[in-house]
Image: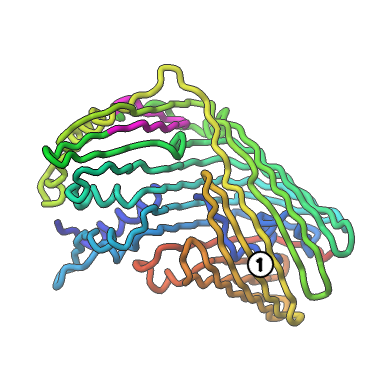
Amino acid sequence: MKFPNYIFLLGFVFLTFGAQAQQDLSLHFVDHVWQARQTNQAMMSENRINITLPSPYFNFYHSAFTFNDIFTKIRGTDSLVLDLSDAIEEMNSDNYYNTQFNLGVLGVGLRFKKLQVNASYSIRTSAYLNYPKTLVDMVWNGNAKYLGKTVNIAPDFQAFAYNEIALGGAYQITEKLSIGAGVKFLSGIADISAANRTNLLNITTDSTFYEVTLNNDYQFNGSSFPYIDSTFSSFDGEFNVEKLFAGNTGLGIDLGATYQLNDKLLLAASVNDLGFINWTANVRNYKSEGAYTYDGIDISPLLSGDTVTFDAVLDTLVQVFDIEPAQNSSSYKTRLGAKIYLSAKYKLKESLTLGGLFYGEIYRGRLVPGIALSASKDFGKIFTLGGVYSIRNNRFMNLGLNTTLRMGPVHLFLVSDNILPLFAPFNSRNFNFRIGLNVAVGKE
Protein backbone atom coordinates (compact mmCIF):
# COMPACT_ATOMS: atom_id res chain seq x y z
CA MET A 1 0.00 0.00 0.00
CA LYS A 2 1.53 3.31 -1.07
CA PHE A 3 0.75 6.82 0.08
CA PRO A 4 2.41 10.20 -0.50
CA ASN A 5 4.66 11.52 2.27
CA TYR A 6 2.27 14.22 3.42
CA ILE A 7 -0.60 11.78 3.87
CA PHE A 8 1.38 9.66 6.30
CA LEU A 9 2.77 12.72 8.05
CA LEU A 10 -0.70 14.17 8.55
CA GLY A 11 -2.00 10.86 9.87
CA PHE A 12 0.94 10.47 12.23
CA VAL A 13 0.48 13.97 13.66
CA PHE A 14 -3.22 13.40 14.29
CA LEU A 15 -2.41 10.04 15.85
CA THR A 16 -0.10 11.68 18.36
CA PHE A 17 -2.88 13.95 19.52
CA GLY A 18 -5.03 10.97 20.25
CA ALA A 19 -3.08 9.74 23.16
CA GLN A 20 0.31 11.61 31.02
CA ALA A 21 0.41 15.11 31.72
CA GLN A 22 3.96 16.34 32.15
CA GLN A 23 5.47 19.64 33.18
CA ASP A 24 8.52 20.98 31.39
CA LEU A 25 11.67 20.65 33.51
CA SER A 26 13.46 23.70 32.09
CA LEU A 27 10.77 26.04 33.39
CA HIS A 28 11.83 25.38 36.99
CA PHE A 29 15.24 26.96 36.35
CA VAL A 30 13.88 30.12 34.72
CA ASP A 31 12.92 31.76 38.01
CA HIS A 32 13.03 35.27 36.51
CA VAL A 33 9.95 34.24 34.48
CA TRP A 34 6.72 34.33 36.51
CA GLN A 35 5.47 30.99 35.11
CA ALA A 36 8.31 29.22 36.99
CA ARG A 37 6.09 29.53 40.06
CA GLN A 38 3.93 26.82 38.54
CA THR A 39 6.67 24.46 39.72
CA ASN A 40 7.12 26.02 43.18
CA GLN A 41 4.75 28.57 44.73
CA ALA A 42 7.41 29.69 47.22
CA MET A 43 9.62 31.36 44.59
CA MET A 44 9.68 35.07 45.36
CA SER A 45 9.58 37.39 42.35
CA GLU A 46 12.02 40.26 41.95
CA ASN A 47 9.20 42.38 40.48
CA ARG A 48 6.28 43.93 42.35
CA ILE A 49 3.74 43.47 39.55
CA ASN A 50 3.68 40.58 37.05
CA ILE A 51 1.04 40.20 34.34
CA THR A 52 1.10 37.04 32.23
CA LEU A 53 -0.45 37.13 28.77
CA PRO A 54 -1.59 34.03 26.81
CA SER A 55 1.15 31.40 27.01
CA PRO A 56 0.85 28.04 25.19
CA TYR A 57 2.64 24.85 26.22
CA PHE A 58 2.88 21.66 24.15
CA ASN A 59 4.39 18.29 25.11
CA PHE A 60 4.64 15.02 23.18
CA TYR A 61 6.26 11.70 24.12
CA HIS A 62 6.15 8.17 22.73
CA SER A 63 8.38 5.45 24.16
CA ALA A 64 8.00 2.85 21.44
CA PHE A 65 9.02 4.13 18.02
CA THR A 66 9.57 7.19 15.86
CA PHE A 67 8.07 8.12 12.51
CA ASN A 68 11.13 6.85 10.63
CA ASP A 69 11.04 3.56 12.54
CA ILE A 70 7.74 2.55 10.96
CA PHE A 71 7.70 4.37 7.61
CA THR A 72 10.30 3.82 4.89
CA LYS A 73 10.53 5.56 1.55
CA ILE A 74 10.06 3.53 -1.60
CA ARG A 75 13.17 3.91 -3.70
CA GLY A 76 12.71 6.26 -6.62
CA THR A 77 9.42 7.69 -5.37
CA ASP A 78 8.06 10.19 -2.86
CA SER A 79 5.82 7.57 -1.31
CA LEU A 80 6.14 5.77 2.01
CA VAL A 81 5.36 2.23 3.04
CA LEU A 82 4.25 1.21 6.53
CA ASP A 83 6.35 -1.54 8.14
CA LEU A 84 6.06 -2.27 11.86
CA SER A 85 8.12 -5.48 11.90
CA ASP A 86 11.44 -4.00 13.11
CA ALA A 87 9.73 -1.50 15.42
CA ILE A 88 7.80 -4.26 17.19
CA GLU A 89 11.01 -6.17 17.90
CA GLU A 90 12.46 -3.08 19.66
CA MET A 91 9.35 -2.29 21.71
CA ASN A 92 9.18 -2.76 25.47
CA SER A 93 6.57 -5.02 27.01
CA ASP A 94 4.80 -1.83 28.24
CA ASN A 95 4.75 1.30 26.10
CA TYR A 96 3.71 4.86 26.88
CA TYR A 97 2.26 7.54 24.73
CA ASN A 98 1.22 11.01 25.86
CA THR A 99 0.51 14.44 24.59
CA GLN A 100 -0.47 17.65 26.32
CA PHE A 101 -1.52 21.15 25.37
CA ASN A 102 -2.02 23.87 27.97
CA LEU A 103 -2.94 27.50 27.50
CA GLY A 104 -2.25 29.97 30.26
CA VAL A 105 -4.87 32.55 29.34
CA LEU A 106 -4.19 35.32 31.84
CA GLY A 107 -2.51 35.76 35.21
CA VAL A 108 -1.36 38.39 37.69
CA GLY A 109 1.16 38.30 40.54
CA LEU A 110 1.73 40.98 43.17
CA ARG A 111 4.52 41.26 45.74
CA PHE A 112 4.30 43.36 48.89
CA LYS A 113 7.75 43.07 50.45
CA LYS A 114 7.57 39.68 52.23
CA LEU A 115 4.12 38.71 50.93
CA GLN A 116 3.32 37.56 47.41
CA VAL A 117 -0.10 36.72 45.92
CA ASN A 118 -1.21 35.54 42.48
CA ALA A 119 -4.24 34.53 40.43
CA SER A 120 -4.54 32.94 36.98
CA TYR A 121 -6.86 31.23 34.54
CA SER A 122 -5.76 28.36 32.28
CA ILE A 123 -7.20 25.70 29.99
CA ARG A 124 -5.48 22.32 30.22
CA THR A 125 -5.74 19.25 28.04
CA SER A 126 -3.91 15.97 28.40
CA ALA A 127 -4.04 12.48 26.96
CA TYR A 128 -2.27 9.30 28.09
CA LEU A 129 -2.04 5.79 26.70
CA ASN A 130 -0.25 2.75 28.11
CA TYR A 131 -0.41 -0.29 25.82
CA PRO A 132 1.30 -3.69 25.75
CA LYS A 133 3.60 -4.85 22.98
CA THR A 134 1.37 -7.87 22.38
CA LEU A 135 -1.46 -5.61 21.22
CA VAL A 136 0.56 -4.18 18.32
CA ASP A 137 2.20 -7.53 17.60
CA MET A 138 -1.14 -9.30 17.21
CA VAL A 139 -2.60 -6.59 14.99
CA TRP A 140 0.43 -6.58 12.69
CA ASN A 141 1.77 -10.15 12.75
CA GLY A 142 -1.30 -12.10 13.72
CA ASN A 143 -1.64 -14.65 16.49
CA ALA A 144 0.48 -17.51 15.12
CA LYS A 145 3.22 -17.17 17.74
CA TYR A 146 0.62 -17.21 20.53
CA LEU A 147 -0.86 -20.65 19.82
CA GLY A 148 -1.90 -22.27 23.09
CA LYS A 149 -1.20 -19.06 25.02
CA THR A 150 -3.31 -16.44 26.76
CA VAL A 151 -2.21 -12.80 26.56
CA ASN A 152 -3.75 -9.61 27.93
CA ILE A 153 -3.86 -6.81 25.37
CA ALA A 154 -5.89 -4.30 27.43
CA PRO A 155 -4.66 -0.69 27.16
CA ASP A 156 -4.92 1.90 29.93
CA PHE A 157 -5.89 5.39 28.81
CA GLN A 158 -7.20 8.78 29.80
CA ALA A 159 -7.90 11.90 27.78
CA PHE A 160 -9.38 15.00 29.40
CA ALA A 161 -9.70 18.78 29.29
CA TYR A 162 -10.53 21.18 32.10
CA ASN A 163 -10.55 24.84 33.16
CA GLU A 164 -8.31 25.94 36.03
CA ILE A 165 -8.70 29.04 38.18
CA ALA A 166 -5.69 29.24 40.50
CA LEU A 167 -5.10 31.37 43.60
CA GLY A 168 -1.75 31.27 45.37
CA GLY A 169 0.54 33.02 47.78
CA ALA A 170 4.02 32.98 49.27
CA TYR A 171 5.55 34.44 52.40
CA GLN A 172 9.18 35.10 53.22
CA ILE A 173 9.39 33.98 56.84
CA THR A 174 13.06 34.86 57.26
CA GLU A 175 15.80 36.11 54.97
CA LYS A 176 16.50 32.48 54.13
CA LEU A 177 13.16 30.66 54.26
CA SER A 178 10.08 31.17 52.07
CA ILE A 179 6.95 29.06 51.92
CA GLY A 180 4.12 29.03 49.40
CA ALA A 181 0.78 27.38 48.68
CA GLY A 182 -1.90 27.48 46.04
CA VAL A 183 -5.42 26.22 45.48
CA LYS A 184 -6.89 25.43 42.08
CA PHE A 185 -10.60 25.39 41.31
CA LEU A 186 -11.21 23.02 38.41
CA SER A 187 -14.09 22.66 35.97
CA GLY A 188 -13.98 19.61 33.74
CA ILE A 189 -14.81 20.07 30.05
CA ALA A 190 -14.53 16.49 28.79
CA ASP A 191 -13.04 13.15 29.79
CA ILE A 192 -12.81 9.60 28.54
CA SER A 193 -10.80 7.17 30.62
CA ALA A 194 -10.38 3.52 31.52
CA ALA A 195 -12.16 2.84 34.79
CA ASN A 196 -9.17 1.04 36.33
CA ARG A 197 -5.77 -0.37 35.44
CA THR A 198 -6.89 -3.95 36.11
CA ASN A 199 -9.08 -4.12 33.02
CA LEU A 200 -8.78 -7.38 31.12
CA LEU A 201 -8.82 -8.17 27.42
CA ASN A 202 -7.45 -11.73 27.39
CA ILE A 203 -6.99 -13.46 24.03
CA THR A 204 -6.45 -17.22 23.87
CA THR A 205 -5.56 -18.97 20.61
CA ASP A 206 -6.45 -22.65 20.44
CA SER A 207 -3.41 -24.66 19.36
CA THR A 208 -5.53 -27.31 17.59
CA PHE A 209 -8.38 -25.51 15.81
CA TYR A 210 -6.79 -22.02 15.85
CA GLU A 211 -9.95 -20.47 17.22
CA VAL A 212 -9.52 -17.23 19.08
CA THR A 213 -11.34 -16.76 22.37
CA LEU A 214 -11.72 -13.35 23.94
CA ASN A 215 -12.35 -13.11 27.70
CA ASN A 216 -12.87 -9.52 28.63
CA ASP A 217 -13.82 -7.44 31.62
CA TYR A 218 -13.20 -3.91 30.44
CA GLN A 219 -14.79 -0.72 31.72
CA PHE A 220 -14.34 2.92 30.80
CA ASN A 221 -16.11 6.17 31.54
CA GLY A 222 -16.90 9.30 29.61
CA SER A 223 -18.14 12.78 30.41
CA SER A 224 -18.55 15.56 27.89
CA PHE A 225 -21.03 17.67 25.98
CA PRO A 226 -21.38 14.92 23.32
CA TYR A 227 -21.88 11.28 24.20
CA ILE A 228 -21.92 8.09 22.19
CA ASP A 229 -24.56 5.41 22.08
CA SER A 230 -24.05 1.67 22.43
CA THR A 231 -23.25 1.17 18.74
CA PHE A 232 -20.85 4.12 18.55
CA SER A 233 -22.81 5.23 15.51
CA SER A 234 -24.24 8.51 16.73
CA PHE A 235 -23.39 11.47 18.92
CA ASP A 236 -25.70 13.55 21.03
CA GLY A 237 -25.23 17.01 22.42
CA GLU A 238 -24.59 20.49 21.07
CA PHE A 239 -21.61 22.61 21.94
CA ASN A 240 -21.79 26.06 23.43
CA VAL A 241 -19.52 28.13 25.63
CA GLU A 242 -21.63 27.48 28.74
CA LYS A 243 -20.81 23.77 28.53
CA LEU A 244 -17.12 24.57 28.90
CA PHE A 245 -18.02 25.20 32.55
CA ALA A 246 -20.17 22.16 33.23
CA GLY A 247 -20.96 20.60 36.58
CA ASN A 248 -17.68 18.65 36.66
CA THR A 249 -15.92 20.25 39.60
CA GLY A 250 -12.55 19.55 41.16
CA LEU A 251 -9.82 20.88 43.41
CA GLY A 252 -6.03 20.96 43.30
CA ILE A 253 -3.39 22.02 45.83
CA ASP A 254 0.23 23.16 45.43
CA LEU A 255 2.77 23.33 48.27
CA GLY A 256 6.34 24.64 48.14
CA ALA A 257 9.33 25.97 50.10
CA THR A 258 12.72 27.51 49.32
CA TYR A 259 15.76 27.86 51.61
CA GLN A 260 18.75 30.12 50.92
CA LEU A 261 21.50 28.06 52.53
CA ASN A 262 24.15 30.72 51.88
CA ASP A 263 24.87 33.53 49.46
CA LYS A 264 25.34 31.10 46.58
CA LEU A 265 23.21 28.01 47.22
CA LEU A 266 19.40 27.91 47.07
CA LEU A 267 17.46 24.73 47.92
CA ALA A 268 13.83 24.18 46.95
CA ALA A 269 11.11 21.53 47.32
CA SER A 270 7.51 21.41 46.15
CA VAL A 271 4.54 19.13 45.51
CA ASN A 272 1.99 20.24 42.94
CA ASP A 273 -1.35 19.10 41.55
CA LEU A 274 -2.59 17.16 44.55
CA GLY A 275 -6.18 16.96 43.47
CA PHE A 276 -9.07 15.45 41.54
CA ILE A 277 -12.06 16.15 39.30
CA ASN A 278 -15.54 14.74 39.94
CA TRP A 279 -17.23 14.00 36.63
CA THR A 280 -21.00 14.36 37.00
CA ALA A 281 -22.25 16.04 33.79
CA ASN A 282 -23.34 13.97 30.78
CA VAL A 283 -21.69 10.87 32.26
CA ARG A 284 -21.68 7.52 30.49
CA ASN A 285 -20.26 4.30 31.97
CA TYR A 286 -19.34 1.66 29.40
CA LYS A 287 -18.61 -2.00 29.96
CA SER A 288 -17.60 -4.99 27.87
CA GLU A 289 -17.76 -8.33 29.66
CA GLY A 290 -17.96 -11.96 28.66
CA ALA A 291 -16.30 -14.67 26.58
CA TYR A 292 -16.46 -14.81 22.79
CA THR A 293 -14.99 -17.18 20.23
CA TYR A 294 -14.50 -15.87 16.71
CA ASP A 295 -12.36 -16.16 13.61
CA GLY A 296 -11.12 -12.61 13.72
CA ILE A 297 -11.56 -9.44 11.69
CA ASP A 298 -10.08 -9.47 8.22
CA ILE A 299 -8.07 -6.27 7.69
CA SER A 300 -6.08 -7.63 4.74
CA PRO A 301 -8.05 -5.49 2.24
CA LEU A 302 -6.73 -2.41 4.00
CA LEU A 303 -3.13 -3.61 3.79
CA SER A 304 -3.40 -4.66 0.16
CA GLY A 305 -4.88 -1.37 -0.99
CA ASP A 306 -8.38 -2.71 -1.69
CA THR A 307 -11.51 -1.04 -0.39
CA VAL A 308 -13.22 -2.16 2.76
CA THR A 309 -16.53 -1.06 4.27
CA PHE A 310 -15.78 0.69 7.55
CA ASP A 311 -19.31 0.19 8.81
CA ALA A 312 -18.88 -3.57 8.46
CA VAL A 313 -15.68 -3.52 10.49
CA LEU A 314 -17.26 -1.28 13.12
CA ASP A 315 -20.34 -3.48 13.40
CA THR A 316 -18.10 -6.53 13.87
CA LEU A 317 -16.10 -4.83 16.60
CA VAL A 318 -19.23 -3.77 18.46
CA GLN A 319 -20.67 -7.26 18.19
CA VAL A 320 -17.46 -8.92 19.41
CA PHE A 321 -16.81 -6.63 22.33
CA ASP A 322 -20.49 -6.02 23.09
CA ILE A 323 -19.83 -2.56 24.52
CA GLU A 324 -22.91 -1.27 26.28
CA PRO A 325 -23.57 1.83 28.37
CA ALA A 326 -24.88 1.32 31.89
CA GLN A 327 -28.60 1.86 32.39
CA ASN A 328 -27.99 4.26 35.26
CA SER A 329 -24.76 6.16 34.72
CA SER A 330 -22.75 6.92 37.86
CA SER A 331 -20.45 9.84 38.45
CA TYR A 332 -16.75 9.06 38.81
CA LYS A 333 -13.52 10.69 39.93
CA THR A 334 -10.14 11.10 38.23
CA ARG A 335 -6.98 12.32 39.92
CA LEU A 336 -4.49 14.86 38.66
CA GLY A 337 -0.91 13.80 38.11
CA ALA A 338 0.93 14.82 41.30
CA LYS A 339 4.35 16.36 40.60
CA ILE A 340 7.39 16.51 42.92
CA TYR A 341 10.31 18.94 42.53
CA LEU A 342 13.54 18.77 44.56
CA SER A 343 16.18 21.20 43.33
CA ALA A 344 19.37 23.13 44.08
CA LYS A 345 20.70 26.26 42.36
CA TYR A 346 24.27 27.46 42.79
CA LYS A 347 25.35 30.95 41.75
CA LEU A 348 28.84 30.36 40.42
CA LYS A 349 29.18 34.02 39.49
CA GLU A 350 26.83 36.97 39.60
CA SER A 351 25.74 36.26 36.03
CA LEU A 352 26.18 32.46 35.89
CA THR A 353 23.96 29.96 37.74
CA LEU A 354 24.13 26.15 37.81
CA GLY A 355 21.27 23.93 38.88
CA GLY A 356 20.15 20.37 39.49
CA LEU A 357 16.64 18.91 39.74
CA PHE A 358 14.96 15.65 40.63
CA TYR A 359 11.44 15.41 39.27
CA GLY A 360 8.78 12.78 39.86
CA GLU A 361 5.27 12.48 38.51
CA ILE A 362 2.65 10.09 39.85
CA TYR A 363 -0.03 9.40 37.30
CA ARG A 364 -2.60 6.58 37.40
CA GLY A 365 -0.50 4.75 39.98
CA ARG A 366 2.81 5.01 38.12
CA LEU A 367 5.88 7.03 39.15
CA VAL A 368 7.69 8.64 36.22
CA PRO A 369 11.02 10.13 37.41
CA GLY A 370 13.32 12.64 35.74
CA ILE A 371 16.71 14.27 36.43
CA ALA A 372 17.92 17.57 34.99
CA LEU A 373 21.11 19.68 35.09
CA SER A 374 21.11 23.31 34.03
CA ALA A 375 23.36 26.30 33.35
CA SER A 376 22.10 29.85 32.88
CA LYS A 377 23.97 32.97 31.83
CA ASP A 378 22.81 36.60 32.07
CA PHE A 379 24.03 38.91 29.33
CA GLY A 380 23.46 42.22 31.02
CA LYS A 381 19.91 43.05 32.10
CA ILE A 382 18.38 42.39 28.70
CA PHE A 383 19.08 38.80 27.69
CA THR A 384 19.36 35.44 29.50
CA LEU A 385 20.33 32.16 27.85
CA GLY A 386 20.21 28.73 29.53
CA GLY A 387 20.74 25.10 28.64
CA VAL A 388 19.36 21.95 30.26
CA TYR A 389 20.36 18.30 30.00
CA SER A 390 17.76 15.87 31.28
CA ILE A 391 17.14 12.15 31.65
CA ARG A 392 13.48 11.29 31.48
CA ASN A 393 11.32 8.35 30.45
CA ASN A 394 14.49 6.27 29.92
CA ARG A 395 15.60 8.75 27.27
CA PHE A 396 19.14 10.09 27.73
CA MET A 397 19.47 12.47 24.79
CA ASN A 398 17.44 15.48 25.90
CA LEU A 399 19.08 18.86 25.36
CA GLY A 400 16.89 21.78 26.33
CA LEU A 401 17.12 25.50 25.81
CA ASN A 402 15.57 28.49 27.54
CA THR A 403 15.91 32.13 26.67
CA THR A 404 14.44 35.40 27.94
CA LEU A 405 14.48 38.78 26.25
CA ARG A 406 13.65 41.75 28.49
CA MET A 407 12.57 44.85 26.62
CA GLY A 408 11.83 47.19 29.51
CA PRO A 409 8.74 45.87 31.32
CA VAL A 410 7.98 43.41 28.49
CA HIS A 411 9.55 39.96 28.89
CA LEU A 412 9.49 37.46 26.03
CA PHE A 413 10.55 33.89 26.82
CA LEU A 414 10.91 30.50 25.15
CA VAL A 415 11.48 27.25 27.07
CA SER A 416 12.05 23.72 25.76
CA ASP A 417 13.30 20.49 27.35
CA ASN A 418 14.51 19.05 24.06
CA ILE A 419 15.42 20.99 20.93
CA LEU A 420 16.93 18.04 19.05
CA PRO A 421 13.62 17.25 17.26
CA LEU A 422 14.01 20.58 15.45
CA PHE A 423 16.93 19.05 13.56
CA ALA A 424 15.59 15.48 13.20
CA PRO A 425 11.80 15.57 13.74
CA PHE A 426 11.11 12.14 12.21
CA ASN A 427 13.63 10.43 14.51
CA SER A 428 12.31 11.94 17.73
CA ARG A 429 10.25 10.39 20.49
CA ASN A 430 9.73 13.48 22.65
CA PHE A 431 9.44 17.21 22.24
CA ASN A 432 7.99 20.14 24.17
CA PHE A 433 8.04 23.90 24.20
CA ARG A 434 6.53 26.84 26.05
CA ILE A 435 6.41 30.40 24.80
CA GLY A 436 5.01 33.47 26.49
CA LEU A 437 4.92 37.21 26.95
CA ASN A 438 4.83 38.85 30.38
CA VAL A 439 4.72 42.38 31.71
CA ALA A 440 6.83 42.97 34.84
CA VAL A 441 6.87 46.31 36.65
CA GLY A 442 8.77 47.55 39.70
CA LYS A 443 11.77 46.05 41.48
CA GLU A 444 11.51 44.58 44.97
Q: Quadrant of residue 156?
A: top left
- Mark 1 lies on residue: 29
Residue 154 x/y as whole percent? 35, 41
Residue 55 visible, this orientation: yes
Q: Quadrant of residue 185?
A: top right
| Residue at position x 15%, y 59% in the image | 2
| Residue at position x 64%, y 71% in the image | 405
- Position of the N terminus, as image quadrant, is bottom left
| Residue at position x 85%, y 64% in the image | 176
Say whether residue 125 is left or right of residue 137.
right
| Residue at position x 88%, y 56% in the image | 173
Q: Residues within 10 Å of mark 1 (few under 14, many from 20)?
A: many
Looking at the rendering, the stretch of residues picked out in magenta corresponds to 215-231
Which of 318/197 is in front?
197
Residue 32 x/y as whole percent? 71, 66
Residue 122 x/y as whole percent? 60, 46
Residue 233 visible, this orientation: no
Residue 206 x/y as whole percent? 17, 39
Q: Is residue 332 magenta?
A: no
Which of 403/94 is in front?
94
- Position of the C terminus, as image quadrant, is bottom right
